[in-house]
Amino acid sequence: MNDAMSDTYNPSEKAVKIVEKIKEMTGIPAIFIDRKPNTVQPSLTDSKFGGLPYWDLQKEYPTDSEGRKMMLLAQINFSDLSTLDTILPKEGMLQFFITVDDDVFGMDFDEPTSQKDFRVVFHDTVKPDVTEAQVQALELVRAEEADDYGTPIFRQAALSFRAGTDYMDTNLTEFPAVFVQAVKAVTGEDIDAETWYQYFAESSEDDGYMSSELSGLGHKMLGYPGFIQFDPREDDEELQSYDTLLLQIDSDMEDGEDYVLWGDCGVANLFINKEALIKRDFGKVLYNWDCS
């Protein structure tokens, strides 16, 4: 149990043991993303949310379904992750673009993998001779300068990365079965997977503690996704092939100031098939975000 959670909740010893058992059962590697202080201004090629994108001038810049140049949501310079042992590339740059001025930020409810109004671009190498002036000449809209209702990025931010262990979110389809097993292991009780959520119903402290410890939220790559509502892949066999969390960007506020805001404090997930990721094929990515 971390100190922040112990300050917020006063869980029972049983709840703590059950949560620790779930962590033991579900822990997998992930890369957690931290937003650097706003005094750090990212360069053209830095990993960042928003801002001016790096761009290989020999390539055609991504446009949306109406032919408008897209804005940078995020870019990951893999040189920042080169010392971390993952299936992610060791070099190159991955960028995520979304359409400008759209109240659903480029998401397509019917075809969430159709990159009409969002785009994922991978650069095998980052050319050091590209200048900010050259990219500015493309006359791009920066996400943090777009209308508040058309962008989730309110301030650009430089990013840092750290390896860690991630745990299963309580909103995932597989969670009830894991919870049942954990309760059995800790207490010896047999409970029904269909009513697992009632187990801590009489203790808001226990329930709140588990939800916080196993929320799945935050900025990250790999690991488990976090959802405010539900997993969009849950009832769609075709979408279930998107089995790897490529990037998750959460709503992010500090001292009352928004840095990232997905609707009403939501979270965005981008998924890819693991084999496609290993092959560096980013042509098919599932993009979804939800909020309360």
Image (cartoon, grey):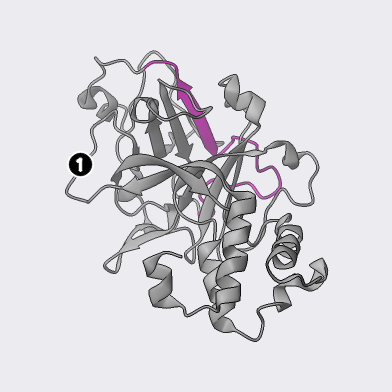
Q: 168 or 46: which is nearer to us? A: 168
For the residue pair 268 and 164, the one nearer the viewer reads as: 164
Q: Is residue 121 magenta?
A: yes
Q: Which amino acid does label 1 sit on?
A: Gln
Instruction: Where is residue 78? Give x, y as percent.
Output: 39, 27
Q: In this view, does 276 lie to the left or right of 60?
A: right
Q: Residue furthest bottom?
A: 202
Q: Is residue 32 visible?
A: yes
Residue 255: quarter of image: bottom left
Q: Which residue lies furthest to the left in this view?
A: 39
| x and y percentages locating residue 132 in the rendered image | 22, 27
Q: Tell me where residue 69 sits by quadrant.
A: top left
Q: Give the x, y percent position of residue 131.
A: 22, 22
Residue at the image position 32 percent from the left and 40 percent from the top: 160
283 lies above or below 96 = above
Instruction: Give the magenta-colored segment's residue range.
Output: 103-125
Question: Left or right: 129 with respect to 177?
Answer: left
Q: Quadrant of residue 137?
A: top left
Query: Which residue is at 62% across, 66% downward?
Result: 18
Picture residue at 50% right of the left edge, 46% below the top? 165
Q: Is residue 281 visible in the rendered structure shown here?
A: no
Residue 8 lies in the magenta-colored region: no
User: Label 1: few (<14), some or many (≥20) within 10 Å?
Assistant: some
Label 1 belongs to which residue?
41
Depth check: 233 or 99 in front? 233
> At which x and y percent is residue 162?
38, 41
Q: In which quarter of the image is the C terminus?
A: bottom right
Q: Of helix, strand and loop, which one carries label 1?
A: loop
